[in-house]
Structure formats: structure tokens, C-alpha cells
Image (cartoon, rainbow, N blue to C red):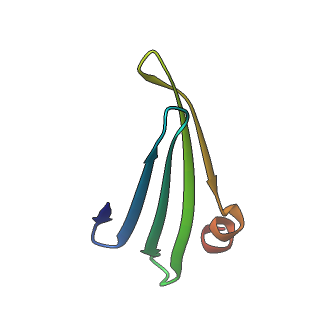
Amino acid sequence: MHVPTDDVVANWRLFHRPKPFAAEARSYARTKTGRTYANEYHFAFTFRDGKIARLREYTDLLHVQEIFG
């Protein structure tokens, strides 16, 4: 799935197996100062009774810090 907005592009890949449900995403954005933010994410969902019981997000936090301080 490709989700564009004015300044941000996010690409998603979804993986469904009985446990857990996983999603990968990539984002691209330009900051107000002109720097490029491009990061990759992995999300792992655990469900209980049809609701999200746990969500873990993995990303490159060093890149986040370098771009946004």
C-alpha cells in the first residue's frame, strides 16, 4: 500500500499469519529545514479477543535523532 500526502510518502507491506500480525513500512519526508527523513519500520501486533493487546515498533532511532534532534 502506498500512502502519499503533500510532504510524506509511506509504503506498507502487511503479513498475516495466525500469530503475530506484522507490518513493514517505509517513510520519506522532507523537514521544514530541507533535510530528508527516510526510515523503515517493523510493527508486530498481538491480538486478544479481537483487539490489539500489544504493539511493538522497531525503527532506526539514531536516524530519528539525527534528523529531528
Question: Whole-percent x and y of residue 60?
Answer: 66, 64
* Towards the viewer: 30 or 58: 58
Q: Quadrant of the C terminus?
A: bottom right
In this view, the residue farthest toward the front is: 17
* Towards the viewer: 54 or 6: 54
Question: Whole-percent x and y of residue 23?
Answer: 48, 50
Q: Residue at x 46, y 67 (%)?
A: 27
Q: Residue at x 42, y 57 (%)?
A: 13
Q: Quadrant of the N terminus?
A: bottom left
- Judged left or right of residue 37, residue 10 is left
* Towards the viewer: 20 or 28: 20
Above or below 6: residue 35: below
- Judged left or right of residue 66, residue 21 is left
Residue 12: name its quadrant: bottom left
Residue 67: name its quadrant: bottom right
In this view, the residue farthest toward the top is: 49
* Towards the viewer: 65 or 48: 48
Q: Residue at x 47, y 84 (%)?
A: 34
User: Looking at the image, how many numbered discs can be counted on the residues?
Assistant: 0
In this view, the residue farthest toward the bottom is: 34
Question: Whole-percent x and y of residue 63?
Answer: 66, 70
Above or below 54: residue 28: below
Question: Whole-percent x and y of residue 35?
Answer: 52, 82
Q: Residue at x 55, y 36 (%)?
A: 20
Above or below 39: residue 42: above
Above or below 6: residue 59: above
